[in-house]
Amino acid sequence: MNYFKYLLDVAANFLGGQQMISLTIFWCVLGGLLAILGFYLIYKSRKGKDYTVLGIALLAVGILVAIGVELNLYVNGTQEDLVRFMFWIKD
C-alpha cells in the first residue's frame, strides 16, 4: 500500500499538489488497462480459448471505471481541476 501512496504523491507533486487530479489520472489509466486486458481476452477467445465472458466483464468494468472517475471530477471538482485534468497543466 505504501507503494501506491508514493505513486500518488509523486503524481500530485508533479501536478502542483493537486491530489484529486492525480487520483483521476491514476484511476483512468487503471480503467484503461482493464479495458485493454478485456479486449485482449476477447481477441484470444477467437483462437479457441474460452475467455469471452471474463473479457467482456473486464472491458465493461474498465470502461465504467474510466468514465466514472471523469464524471466524479466533473461533478465534485472545481472548474480549475477539470481544466488541469484535460490539459495537464501544472499551474
Image (tube, grey):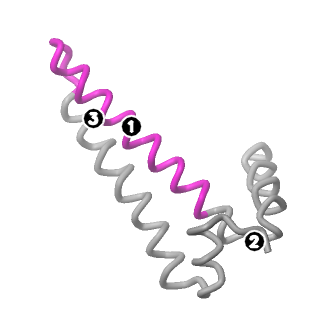
Q: Would you say residue 47 sits in the magenta stretch?
A: yes
Which label was assigned to residue 57? Answer: none
Residue corresponding to mark 2: 18
Q: Residue at x 75, y 56 (%)?
A: 11
Question: Residue 38: percent from the left, percent from the top?
Answer: 32, 36
> What secondary structure is marked by label 3?
helix
Q: Which comes before the other along the chain, label 1 or label 3? A: 1
Q: Which comes before the other along the chain, label 3 or label 2? A: 2
Task: Please state which amino acid type lies under the numbered disc 2.
Answer: Gln
**Residue closest to the eye, 13 or 59:** 13
Which is closer to the viewer, label 3 or label 2?
2
Does 66 sit left or right of 14 as displayed? left
> What secondary structure is marked by label 2?
loop
Does 40 sit left or right of 53 as displayed? right
Q: Residue at x 23, y 40 (%)?
A: 56
Does 84 sit left or right of 75 as displayed? right
Label 2: few (<14), some or many (≥20) within 10 Å?
some
Q: Is residue 47 above or below residue 26?
A: above
Task: Please state which amino acid type lies under the numbered disc 3.
Answer: Gly
Which is closer to the viewer, label 1 or label 3?
1
The image quadrant where one finds the C terminus is bottom right
Task: Please state which amino acid type lies under the numbered disc 1.
Answer: Ile
Label 3: few (<14), some or many (≥20) within 10 Å?
many
Outermost residue, top direction? 48
Q: Which comes before the other along the chain, label 1 or label 2? A: 2
Q: Residue at x 55, y 84 (%)?
A: 76
Question: Residue 44: percent from the left, percent from the top?
Answer: 25, 20
Q: Which residues are magenta?
A: 24-51
Which label was assigned to residue 36? Answer: 1
Q: Would you say residue 61 sits in the magenta stretch?
A: no
Residue corresponding to mark 3: 55
Question: Residue 35: percent from the left, percent from the top?
Answer: 37, 43
